[in-house]
Image (tube, rainbow, N blue to C red):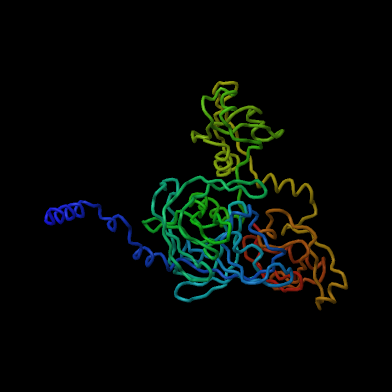
Amino acid sequence: MYKNLVTFFVTVLFFLPTVDAALPDFSDLVKDVSPSVVKINTLSIPEQYSSQQIPDIFRDLFEYRGQPRSPAQKVRSSGSGFVISSDGYIVTNHHVVDQATEIQVLFSDRSEYQAIVIGSDRRSDLALLKIEAKGLEAQEFANSDKLKVGEWVLAIGSPFGLDYSATAGIVSAKGRSLPTDQGENYVPFIQTDVAINPGNSGGPLFDLNGRVVGINSQIFSRSGGSIGLSFSIPSNVALRVVEQLKETGVVQRGWLGVAIQDVNKALAQSLELGKPRGALINAVEMDSPADKGGIEPGDVIISVDGQDIVDADDLPHLVGMLAPETKTKIEVIRKGKRKLLKVTVGALDGYEAKNAKTEDNNSDRLGLTVTSVSEDQLRELRLRGGVLVAEVLSDSPSAVAGIKSGDILVQLGYSRIDDSDEYQQVIADMPKNTPILVRFYRQGWAISKTIVIK
C-alpha cells in the first residue's frame, strides 16, 4: 500500500509544471539598464501643494521632503528619470521638475550633474532635461502598441529615496483613461501591478528585452502607497512628445473642436448602432476643424484613420497624437448610416496660444509683459533694479522656462537688468536657439534658469 502511495506522489510531482522555469530572471536585465536610470533631486518654491492636477485618489509618484504648504519655504523633492541619448538628454515627469529652481541628476556610479529643462509638457506629464555629459549609456524605446496584457515588465527608480530599486509585475491593462481636474485626457495609460511608490515618478518601465515601454507617472491609492494599481505613459506617446520638446520646447496636439460622451446600450439602440461603441458628438464648435470637416451633433465617430473608437476616451487619445494640419479620415454613423469624412486636424496648443496672443498683444520675444518694480519692493529685496513680470504668454519661451507673473527679472545672459529700457535692449539682441541664463527673484528667493528663443 505504502509503495503504491509513494509511486503515486512521485508520478504527480514528476508531471507537475515547473513553476520556476516559467518565471523570468531579471538580474541580467537590471544590471544592463541600471547605468541609464537616474535619481532626480529638486529644490522648488511651490505656490501651494497639489497632486499634479489629478483626482485625489490618483497619486503622482513624486516624493516631497519638506513642508510645501508654506509658500515662502524651499522644498526638497526627489523623483526618477532615464537617459535617452549619450550626449545627456534625460526624460522624466513634468511634475518632477515643475516649479523647480534647481535640478540635480545622480547616477548609480554616484556621479552628479546639474540639469536644465529643455521643455516640459503638463498634458502628458513629461519633461526633457539636459546635462553636460558625453558617452552616457542610453535607453531605447520599444513600440508600446505591441505590448500585451499579461506581459512581464520591470520598473527601476528611487521609491522613498531608496536609490535604484527594481520591482517587477505584469501589464494589467492598456489604454486607461485618467482625466485631469481640467477634464483633459490625452494619455492612454498602461496599467500594471508593478510595485511603485513616491520617488518612482519619471522612472522607466522596461520590457523583457530591456527597452522602455513606459514612463511611470501615477498610482491609484487611498493611502498614498502602492496597492498594485500603477499607471505609466506609453513609450509611443513619450517618443512624440520628447521629439517635439527637443525641437521646439513645446508640444503641438491635434484638435477637432467637439464635445463628446460615451454611448450606452440605450443610446446605441436609438442611434441604430447595433451595440455600444464610438464617441457621440454632443456639440461642434463653430469654425473648428470638425465643423469645417462636416461633423455634426448627433454623429457617432467610430474610427479615425482606420483605428476603432471603442469608447469616447479613445477619441482624444488618437486625435491628440496627430500632428496639426494632418488630413485624416473619420468614419461616423449618422442616422443609422456610415459616412466617411475627410477632416484636417487643427492645433490644440496653437489654438490656445493664438487666443492668448489676442488677449495680450504687448508680449515680447520672451512671451512677457513687464512693468517697473516699485521702490518699496526694491528696498525690501535690496535690489538696485529689475523689471516685474506682469503677464506670461502661454507656451512662450518664458512659460517653458518656468517664469511666472510676479517674478522680478534682474539678469539676462551677462547683462544686468535695472529697468524696462535696459530689458528691451537686451532681449532685442538675444540669439535664437541658444540657452541664455535668466536670473530672477520669486518670493524673496533668487532663482537662475535658462531660456531659449525658438
The residue located at (71%, 63%) in the rendering is 48
**Which image quarter is the N terminus in?**
bottom left
**Which image quarter is the C terminus in?**
bottom right
Q: Outermost residue toward the right?
A: 375
User: x, y percentage for residue 358?
Assistant: 77, 47
Rendered view: 3 above or below 304: below
Q: How many numbered tags mark residues here?
A: 0
User: x, y percentage for residue 387?
Assistant: 80, 67
Q: Outermost residue toward the front?
A: 1
State the residue in front, 300 or 407: 300
Rendered view: 263 above or below 411: above
User: x, y percentage for residue 135?
Assistant: 44, 69
Residue 378 sits in which quadrant? Answer: bottom right
User: x, y percentage for residue 411?
Assistant: 73, 71
Q: Outermost residue toward the bottom?
A: 382
The residue located at (61%, 31%) in the rendering is 280
State the residue in front, 254 or 276: 276
State the residue in front, 9 or 74: 9
